Image (cartoon, helix red, strand yellow):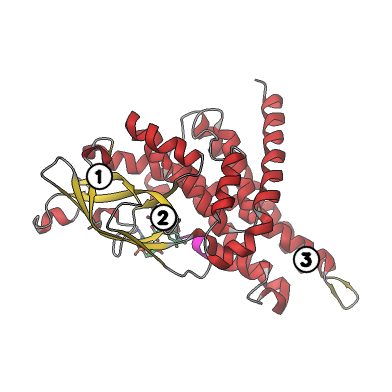
Protein backbone atom coordinates (compact mmCIF):
# COMPACT_ATOMS: atom_id res chain seq x y z
CA UNK A 1 0.00 0.00 0.00
CA UNK A 2 1.37 3.48 -0.86
CA UNK A 3 1.98 6.09 1.85
CA UNK A 4 -1.02 8.06 0.57
CA UNK A 5 -3.28 4.98 0.77
CA UNK A 6 -2.07 4.26 4.31
CA UNK A 7 -2.76 7.86 5.34
CA UNK A 8 -6.22 7.76 3.76
CA UNK A 9 -6.98 4.49 5.62
CA UNK A 10 -5.83 5.97 8.90
CA UNK A 11 -7.91 9.06 8.34
CA UNK A 12 -10.97 6.82 7.89
CA UNK A 13 -10.07 4.98 11.10
CA UNK A 14 -9.71 8.33 12.90
CA UNK A 15 -13.16 9.49 11.80
CA UNK A 16 -14.74 6.17 12.74
CA UNK A 17 -13.06 6.06 16.17
CA UNK A 18 -13.93 9.71 16.85
CA UNK A 19 -17.56 9.06 16.01
CA UNK A 20 -17.69 6.05 18.39
CA UNK A 21 -15.99 7.99 21.21
CA UNK A 22 -18.33 10.96 20.74
CA UNK A 23 -21.33 8.65 20.94
CA UNK A 24 -20.25 6.06 23.52
CA UNK A 25 -17.85 7.93 25.80
CA UNK A 26 -18.32 11.70 25.95
CA UNK A 27 -22.02 11.73 27.03
CA UNK A 28 -21.15 9.49 30.01
CA UNK A 29 -17.68 10.76 30.86
CA UNK A 30 -18.68 13.02 33.77
CA UNK A 31 -20.77 10.28 35.34
CA UNK A 32 -17.83 7.83 35.03
CA UNK A 33 -15.49 10.42 36.58
CA UNK A 34 -17.87 10.76 39.54
CA UNK A 35 -18.27 7.04 40.12
CA UNK A 36 -14.58 6.31 39.43
CA UNK A 37 -14.93 3.65 36.73
CA UNK A 38 -16.37 3.00 33.27
CA UNK A 39 -19.89 1.59 33.29
CA UNK A 40 -20.38 -2.00 32.21
CA UNK A 41 -22.52 -0.75 29.31
CA UNK A 42 -19.70 1.60 28.26
CA UNK A 43 -17.18 -1.21 28.11
CA UNK A 44 -19.61 -3.35 26.10
CA UNK A 45 -20.42 -0.57 23.60
CA UNK A 46 -16.73 0.04 22.91
CA UNK A 47 -16.17 -3.71 22.52
CA UNK A 48 -19.11 -4.00 20.12
CA UNK A 49 -17.62 -1.19 18.04
CA UNK A 50 -14.55 -3.42 17.64
CA UNK A 51 -12.20 -1.02 19.41
CA UNK A 52 -10.65 -3.67 21.69
CA UNK A 53 -9.75 -5.88 18.74
CA UNK A 54 -7.36 -3.49 16.98
CA UNK A 55 -3.93 -5.05 16.36
CA UNK A 56 -1.08 -4.83 18.89
CA UNK A 57 1.65 -5.33 16.30
CA UNK A 58 2.44 -5.18 12.60
CA UNK A 59 1.08 -2.58 10.15
CA UNK A 60 -2.38 -2.78 11.80
CA UNK A 61 -0.88 -1.22 14.92
CA UNK A 62 -1.09 2.14 13.15
CA UNK A 63 -4.87 1.92 13.59
CA UNK A 64 -4.30 1.32 17.28
CA UNK A 65 -2.05 4.38 17.40
CA UNK A 66 -4.89 6.46 15.93
CA UNK A 67 -7.31 5.00 18.49
CA UNK A 68 -4.94 5.79 21.39
CA UNK A 69 -4.40 9.37 20.22
CA UNK A 70 -8.15 9.87 19.81
CA UNK A 71 -8.77 8.44 23.28
CA UNK A 72 -6.39 11.11 24.57
CA UNK A 73 -8.34 13.76 22.67
CA UNK A 74 -11.48 12.98 24.70
CA UNK A 75 -9.77 15.04 27.43
CA UNK A 76 -10.30 12.44 30.16
CA UNK A 77 -7.03 10.81 31.22
CA UNK A 78 -8.81 8.41 33.57
CA UNK A 79 -10.88 7.02 30.72
CA UNK A 80 -7.95 6.76 28.37
CA UNK A 81 -5.84 5.04 31.06
CA UNK A 82 -8.58 2.50 31.89
CA UNK A 83 -8.95 1.60 28.22
CA UNK A 84 -5.20 1.69 27.55
CA UNK A 85 -4.57 -0.81 30.35
CA UNK A 86 -7.50 -3.05 29.38
CA UNK A 87 -6.96 -3.17 25.62
CA UNK A 88 -3.17 -2.79 25.36
CA UNK A 89 -0.94 -2.80 28.44
CA UNK A 90 -2.33 -5.82 30.32
CA UNK A 91 -3.17 -8.13 27.37
CA UNK A 92 0.21 -7.44 25.76
CA UNK A 93 1.76 -9.93 28.22
CA UNK A 94 -0.60 -12.67 27.00
CA UNK A 95 -0.27 -11.75 23.33
CA UNK A 96 3.52 -11.71 23.44
CA UNK A 97 4.40 -14.37 26.00
CA UNK A 98 1.23 -16.30 26.94
CA UNK A 99 0.49 -19.94 26.12
CA UNK A 100 -2.10 -20.89 23.47
CA UNK A 101 -4.45 -21.89 26.31
CA UNK A 102 -4.07 -18.55 28.08
CA UNK A 103 -4.61 -16.67 24.83
CA UNK A 104 -7.74 -18.70 24.01
CA UNK A 105 -9.23 -18.34 27.47
CA UNK A 106 -8.59 -14.64 28.00
CA UNK A 107 -8.10 -12.67 24.77
CA UNK A 108 -11.59 -13.13 23.25
CA UNK A 109 -13.12 -12.30 26.65
CA UNK A 110 -11.02 -9.11 26.81
CA UNK A 111 -11.98 -8.11 23.26
CA UNK A 112 -15.67 -8.58 24.13
CA UNK A 113 -15.14 -6.80 27.50
CA UNK A 114 -16.51 -9.83 29.32
CA UNK A 115 -13.37 -9.58 31.42
CA UNK A 116 -11.77 -6.22 32.13
CA UNK A 117 -7.99 -6.53 32.26
CA UNK A 118 -5.70 -4.96 34.86
CA UNK A 119 -1.95 -4.97 35.42
CA UNK A 120 -0.51 -5.33 38.93
CA UNK A 121 3.22 -4.68 39.04
CA UNK A 122 3.72 -1.89 41.61
CA UNK A 123 3.95 -2.34 45.38
CA UNK A 124 5.05 -0.23 48.33
CA UNK A 125 8.81 0.16 47.77
CA UNK A 126 8.60 -1.58 44.40
CA UNK A 127 7.41 0.88 41.75
CA UNK A 128 10.44 2.05 39.81
CA UNK A 129 12.40 -0.76 41.46
CA UNK A 130 10.43 -3.85 40.44
CA UNK A 131 13.27 -6.02 41.76
CA UNK A 132 11.90 -5.37 45.25
CA UNK A 133 8.49 -6.96 44.60
CA UNK A 134 7.41 -8.97 47.67
CA UNK A 135 4.11 -10.48 46.51
CA UNK A 136 4.81 -14.18 46.76
CA UNK A 137 3.72 -17.16 44.70
CA UNK A 138 4.45 -20.19 46.84
CA UNK A 139 4.43 -23.53 44.98
CA UNK A 140 1.78 -25.91 46.39
CA UNK A 141 1.56 -29.69 46.45
CA UNK A 142 -0.67 -29.81 43.29
CA UNK A 143 1.78 -28.09 40.96
CA UNK A 144 0.02 -24.76 41.43
CA UNK A 145 0.77 -21.72 43.59
CA UNK A 146 -0.58 -19.81 46.56
CA UNK A 147 -0.43 -16.08 45.85
CA UNK A 148 -0.14 -13.57 48.72
CA UNK A 149 0.73 -9.89 48.83
CA UNK A 150 -0.48 -6.36 48.24
CA UNK A 151 -0.35 -4.49 44.92
CA UNK A 152 -0.75 -0.72 44.74
CA UNK A 153 -2.18 1.71 42.16
CA UNK A 154 -3.86 -0.97 40.00
CA UNK A 155 -5.96 0.74 37.29
CA UNK A 156 -9.30 -1.04 36.60
CA UNK A 157 -8.81 -2.71 40.01
CA UNK A 158 -12.42 -2.99 41.17
CA UNK A 159 -13.84 -3.89 37.73
CA UNK A 160 -11.14 -6.37 36.71
CA UNK A 161 -11.86 -9.92 35.63
CA UNK A 162 -8.19 -10.68 34.95
CA UNK A 163 -5.13 -9.27 36.71
CA UNK A 164 -1.70 -9.77 35.16
CA UNK A 165 0.40 -9.95 38.31
CA UNK A 166 4.13 -9.83 39.02
CA UNK A 167 5.21 -11.99 41.97
CA UNK A 168 8.25 -13.64 43.49
CA UNK A 169 8.23 -17.44 43.27
CA UNK A 170 9.35 -19.40 46.32
CA UNK A 171 8.39 -20.34 49.85
CA UNK A 172 7.38 -17.54 52.19
CA UNK A 173 10.38 -18.17 54.46
CA UNK A 174 13.06 -17.91 51.73
CA UNK A 175 16.18 -16.06 52.84
CA UNK A 176 16.77 -12.31 52.64
CA UNK A 177 18.91 -12.59 49.49
CA UNK A 178 15.91 -13.98 47.63
CA UNK A 179 13.69 -11.11 48.76
CA UNK A 180 15.36 -8.85 46.18
CA UNK A 181 16.47 -9.11 42.57
CA UNK A 182 14.70 -10.06 39.38
CA UNK A 183 15.82 -13.66 39.04
CA UNK A 184 12.90 -15.28 40.88
CA UNK A 185 10.15 -13.10 39.50
CA UNK A 186 7.30 -14.49 37.42
CA UNK A 187 4.15 -13.14 35.81
CA UNK A 188 0.76 -14.74 36.45
CA UNK A 189 -2.66 -14.50 34.82
CA UNK A 190 -4.85 -14.19 37.92
CA UNK A 191 -8.62 -14.63 37.81
CA UNK A 192 -9.79 -11.52 39.66
CA UNK A 193 -12.94 -13.34 40.76
CA UNK A 194 -10.97 -16.04 42.60
CA UNK A 195 -11.35 -16.41 46.37
CA UNK A 196 -8.84 -14.24 48.27
CA UNK A 197 -8.64 -11.37 45.72
CA UNK A 198 -9.87 -8.03 47.13
CA UNK A 199 -9.71 -4.57 45.54
CA UNK A 200 -10.02 -1.35 47.56
CA UNK A 201 -10.32 1.98 45.69
CA UNK A 202 -7.36 4.36 46.14
CA UNK A 203 -8.82 7.85 45.64
CA UNK A 204 -6.49 9.82 43.33
CA UNK A 205 -6.31 13.54 42.56
CA UNK A 206 -6.88 12.94 38.84
CA UNK A 207 -7.38 9.98 36.48
CA UNK A 208 -10.70 9.58 38.28
CA UNK A 209 -12.27 7.03 35.92
CA UNK A 210 -9.16 4.85 35.98
CA UNK A 211 -10.51 2.93 38.99
CA UNK A 212 -7.10 2.89 40.70
CA UNK A 213 -7.16 0.36 43.54
CA UNK A 214 -5.03 -1.44 46.07
CA UNK A 215 -5.37 -5.16 45.33
CA UNK A 216 -4.78 -7.71 48.08
CA UNK A 217 -4.07 -11.37 47.37
CA UNK A 218 -4.70 -13.58 50.38
CA UNK A 219 -3.59 -17.16 49.68
CA UNK A 220 -5.16 -17.11 46.23
CA UNK A 221 -4.97 -20.57 44.63
CA UNK A 222 -3.47 -20.43 41.15
CA UNK A 223 -3.24 -23.40 38.78
CA UNK A 224 0.25 -24.28 37.51
CA UNK A 225 -0.63 -22.97 34.05
CA UNK A 226 -1.36 -19.47 35.38
CA UNK A 227 2.35 -18.66 34.88
CA UNK A 228 2.95 -16.52 31.81
CA UNK A 229 5.85 -17.78 29.70
CA UNK A 230 9.02 -19.08 31.34
CA UNK A 231 9.75 -17.57 34.77
CA UNK A 232 13.49 -17.38 33.98
CA UNK A 233 12.70 -14.95 31.18
CA UNK A 234 10.54 -12.56 33.20
CA UNK A 235 13.14 -9.80 33.11
CA UNK A 236 13.14 -9.88 29.29
CA UNK A 237 9.33 -9.96 29.21
CA UNK A 238 9.12 -6.94 31.51
CA UNK A 239 11.64 -4.96 29.48
CA UNK A 240 9.72 -5.59 26.23
CA UNK A 241 6.26 -5.07 27.70
CA UNK A 242 7.31 -1.87 29.47
CA UNK A 243 8.61 -0.46 26.17
CA UNK A 244 5.20 -1.15 24.66
CA UNK A 245 3.47 0.29 27.75
CA UNK A 246 5.48 3.52 27.38
CA UNK A 247 4.62 3.74 23.69
CA UNK A 248 0.93 3.42 24.59
CA UNK A 249 1.26 5.94 27.46
CA UNK A 250 3.08 8.34 25.11
CA UNK A 251 0.43 8.12 22.37
CA UNK A 252 -2.36 8.65 24.91
CA UNK A 253 -0.52 11.69 26.28
CA UNK A 254 -0.07 13.14 22.75
CA UNK A 255 -3.87 13.07 22.34
CA UNK A 256 -4.38 14.47 25.84
CA UNK A 257 -2.03 17.37 25.12
CA UNK A 258 -3.80 18.06 21.82
CA UNK A 259 -7.09 18.35 23.77
CA UNK A 260 -5.48 20.72 26.28
CA UNK A 261 -3.92 22.98 23.63
CA UNK A 262 -7.28 23.16 21.77
CA UNK A 263 -9.06 24.00 25.03
CA UNK A 264 -6.58 26.83 25.66
CA UNK A 265 -6.68 28.04 22.05
CA UNK A 266 -10.50 28.17 21.97
CA UNK A 267 -10.65 29.93 25.32
CA UNK A 268 -8.01 32.48 24.34
CA UNK A 269 -9.93 33.33 21.14
CA UNK A 270 -13.35 33.57 22.81
CA UNK A 271 -12.66 35.09 26.22
CA UNK A 272 -12.75 38.89 26.21
CA UNK A 273 -10.77 41.27 28.38
CA UNK A 274 -10.75 45.06 27.96
CA UNK A 275 -13.00 44.72 24.93
CA UNK A 276 -10.69 42.37 23.03
CA UNK A 277 -10.08 38.64 22.81
CA UNK A 278 -7.52 37.30 25.28
CA UNK A 279 -5.60 36.06 22.24
CA UNK A 280 -5.13 39.67 21.11
CA UNK A 281 -2.28 39.80 23.65
CA UNK A 282 1.02 38.79 22.16
CA UNK A 283 2.08 37.02 25.37
CA UNK A 284 -0.94 34.71 25.04
CA UNK A 285 -0.66 34.20 21.26
CA UNK A 286 3.01 33.28 21.55
CA UNK A 287 2.38 30.88 24.42
CA UNK A 288 -0.30 29.09 22.39
CA UNK A 289 1.96 29.12 19.34
CA UNK A 290 4.90 27.62 21.29
CA UNK A 291 2.68 24.87 22.74
CA UNK A 292 1.20 24.11 19.29
CA UNK A 293 4.69 23.90 17.82
CA UNK A 294 5.93 21.57 20.59
CA UNK A 295 2.80 19.49 20.17
CA UNK A 296 3.38 19.16 16.42
CA UNK A 297 6.89 17.80 17.10
CA UNK A 298 5.72 15.33 19.73
CA UNK A 299 2.82 14.21 17.49
CA UNK A 300 5.28 13.46 14.69
CA UNK A 301 7.57 11.61 17.08
CA UNK A 302 4.57 9.59 18.28
CA UNK A 303 3.81 8.59 14.69
CA UNK A 304 7.47 7.66 14.17
CA UNK A 305 7.45 5.56 17.35
CA UNK A 306 4.22 3.83 16.27
CA UNK A 307 5.74 3.07 12.87
CA UNK A 308 8.89 1.69 14.50
CA UNK A 309 6.69 -0.60 16.59
CA UNK A 310 4.66 -1.62 13.51
CA UNK A 311 7.96 -2.62 11.85
CA UNK A 312 9.05 -4.57 14.95
CA UNK A 313 11.80 -2.05 15.68
CA UNK A 314 10.60 -0.23 18.80
CA UNK A 315 13.35 0.06 21.40
CA UNK A 316 13.68 1.46 24.92
CA UNK A 317 15.17 4.71 23.63
CA UNK A 318 12.31 5.61 21.27
CA UNK A 319 9.61 4.52 23.75
CA UNK A 320 11.24 6.47 26.61
CA UNK A 321 11.74 9.64 24.54
CA UNK A 322 8.08 9.62 23.48
CA UNK A 323 6.79 8.92 27.00
CA UNK A 324 9.06 11.59 28.53
CA UNK A 325 8.39 14.34 26.01
CA UNK A 326 4.65 13.75 25.59
CA UNK A 327 3.86 13.54 29.32
CA UNK A 328 6.07 16.52 30.25
CA UNK A 329 4.57 18.64 27.47
CA UNK A 330 1.13 17.69 28.84
CA UNK A 331 2.13 19.17 32.23
CA UNK A 332 3.48 22.39 30.66
CA UNK A 333 0.37 22.80 28.48
CA UNK A 334 -1.99 22.08 31.39
CA UNK A 335 -0.27 24.70 33.54
CA UNK A 336 -0.63 27.35 30.80
CA UNK A 337 -4.23 26.31 30.15
CA UNK A 338 -5.09 26.73 33.83
CA UNK A 339 -3.26 30.10 34.08
CA UNK A 340 -5.00 31.68 31.09
CA UNK A 341 -8.42 30.44 32.22
CA UNK A 342 -8.07 32.59 35.36
CA UNK A 343 -10.10 31.61 38.42
CA UNK A 344 -12.67 29.73 36.29
CA UNK A 345 -9.89 27.26 35.41
CA UNK A 346 -9.29 26.64 39.10
CA UNK A 347 -12.94 25.66 39.70
CA UNK A 348 -13.02 22.00 40.69
CA UNK A 349 -15.53 21.10 37.96
CA UNK A 350 -13.75 22.88 35.08
CA UNK A 351 -12.10 21.05 32.19
CA UNK A 352 -8.91 23.08 32.75
CA UNK A 353 -8.68 21.86 36.36
CA UNK A 354 -9.30 18.24 35.32
CA UNK A 355 -6.61 18.40 32.64
CA UNK A 356 -4.20 19.98 35.16
CA UNK A 357 -4.73 17.23 37.76
CA UNK A 358 -4.68 14.49 35.12
CA UNK A 359 -1.42 15.68 33.57
CA UNK A 360 0.50 15.38 36.84
CA UNK A 361 0.09 11.58 36.92
CA UNK A 362 1.37 11.08 33.37
CA UNK A 363 4.99 11.78 34.32
CA UNK A 364 4.80 9.10 37.08
CA UNK A 365 2.61 6.22 35.85
CA UNK A 366 4.29 3.64 33.56
CA UNK A 367 7.67 4.81 34.89
CA UNK A 368 8.61 8.30 36.12
CA UNK A 369 10.36 10.87 33.93
CA UNK A 370 13.63 10.37 35.84
CA UNK A 371 13.65 6.70 34.85
CA UNK A 372 12.93 7.67 31.23
CA UNK A 373 15.95 9.97 31.31
CA UNK A 374 18.11 7.17 32.74
CA UNK A 375 16.99 4.83 29.94
CA UNK A 376 17.64 7.49 27.28
CA UNK A 377 21.09 8.20 28.71
CA UNK A 378 21.96 4.49 28.91
CA UNK A 379 20.83 3.85 25.32
CA UNK A 380 23.09 6.48 23.78
C1 LIG B 1 -2.55 7.23 38.28
C2 LIG B 1 -1.61 6.07 38.36
C3 LIG B 1 -1.98 4.83 37.83
C4 LIG B 1 -1.12 3.74 37.94
N1 LIG B 1 -1.52 2.52 37.44
C5 LIG B 1 -0.75 1.43 37.65
C6 LIG B 1 -1.20 0.13 37.26
O1 LIG B 1 -2.27 -0.03 36.65
N2 LIG B 1 -0.43 -0.94 37.56
C7 LIG B 1 0.77 -0.80 38.23
O2 LIG B 1 1.43 -1.81 38.47
N3 LIG B 1 1.23 0.41 38.61
C8 LIG B 1 0.50 1.52 38.34
N4 LIG B 1 0.94 2.76 38.75
C9 LIG B 1 2.18 2.84 39.49
C10 LIG B 1 3.33 3.46 38.70
O3 LIG B 1 3.79 2.58 37.71
C11 LIG B 1 4.41 3.84 39.73
O4 LIG B 1 3.89 4.91 40.48
C12 LIG B 1 5.72 4.25 39.08
O5 LIG B 1 6.37 3.14 38.49
C13 LIG B 1 6.68 4.86 40.14
O6 LIG B 1 6.78 4.03 41.25
P1 LIG B 1 6.51 4.63 42.72
O7 LIG B 1 5.26 5.42 42.71
O8 LIG B 1 6.61 3.50 43.68
O9 LIG B 1 7.69 5.66 42.95
P2 LIG B 1 9.17 5.33 43.44
O10 LIG B 1 9.75 4.22 42.67
O11 LIG B 1 9.16 5.23 44.92
O12 LIG B 1 9.88 6.70 43.01
C14 LIG B 1 9.48 7.94 43.63
C15 LIG B 1 9.99 9.07 42.77
O13 LIG B 1 11.42 9.04 42.79
C16 LIG B 1 11.92 9.55 41.58
N5 LIG B 1 12.84 8.56 40.99
C17 LIG B 1 12.64 7.24 40.75
N6 LIG B 1 13.71 6.69 40.17
C18 LIG B 1 14.63 7.68 40.03
C19 LIG B 1 15.94 7.77 39.49
N7 LIG B 1 16.54 6.70 38.95
N8 LIG B 1 16.58 8.97 39.51
C20 LIG B 1 15.99 10.07 40.06
N9 LIG B 1 14.75 10.05 40.57
C21 LIG B 1 14.07 8.88 40.56
C22 LIG B 1 10.73 9.79 40.65
O14 LIG B 1 10.41 11.17 40.66
C23 LIG B 1 9.63 8.98 41.28
O15 LIG B 1 8.34 9.53 41.01
C24 LIG B 1 0.13 3.88 38.60
C25 LIG B 1 0.49 5.13 39.11
C26 LIG B 1 -0.35 6.21 38.99
C27 LIG B 1 0.08 7.54 39.55
Query: Toward which corner of the image does residue 10 lie, by quadrant?
Result: top right
Quadrant of the frame with the C terminus? top left
Q: Residue furthest top?
A: 1
Q: Earlier in the sequence, mark 1 or mark 2?
A: 1
Are the residues tagged 2 and 3 within 8 Å (C-beta)? no
Magenta-highlighted residues: 360-364
Answer whether residue 354 is magenta in the image. Answer: no
The mark found on residue 364 in the picture is none
Magenta stretch: helix, strand or loop mostly: helix
Upstream in sequence: badge 2 or badge 3: 3
Of circles 1 and 2, which is in front? 1
Residue 367's disc is: 2
Q: Is residue 138 left or right of residue 195?
A: left
Provide residue 104's location: percent of width, then percent of height: 39, 32
Query: For ligand 1, which image quadrant applies?
Result: bottom left
Tell me: is circle 1 under 8 Å from ligand 1: no
Nearer the observer: mark 3 or 1; the answer is: 1
Dot 3 crowding, Cα within 10 Å, few <14, some 14–19, many 20+: some
For label 1, the SS is: strand
Q: Position of residue 360 (x, y in %)?
A: 52, 65
Tell me residue 276's x, y (percent): 89, 72
For the point 42% across and 41% down, the residue is 91
Mark 3 residue element: helix
**Residue 267: assigned label:** 3
Q: Nearer the viewer, residue 27 or 318?
A: 27
Residue density around tag 2, few if under 14, some if 14–19, many if 20 or more, within 10 Å? many
User: Mark 2 near ligand 1 (CB under 8 Å)?
Assistant: yes
Q: Label 1: which residue? A: 186
Amino acid sequence: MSTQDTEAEQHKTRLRVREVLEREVLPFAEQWEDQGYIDRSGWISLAEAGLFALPHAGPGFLDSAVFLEELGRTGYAGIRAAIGVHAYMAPSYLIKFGSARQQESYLPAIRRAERIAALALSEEGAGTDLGSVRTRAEPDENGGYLLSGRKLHVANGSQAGLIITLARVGPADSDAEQQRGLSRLALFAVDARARGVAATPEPMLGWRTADVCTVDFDNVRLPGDAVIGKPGRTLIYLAQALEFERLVAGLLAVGGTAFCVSLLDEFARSHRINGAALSANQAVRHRVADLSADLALVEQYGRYAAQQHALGRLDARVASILKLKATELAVTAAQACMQFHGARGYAADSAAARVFLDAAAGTIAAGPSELMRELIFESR
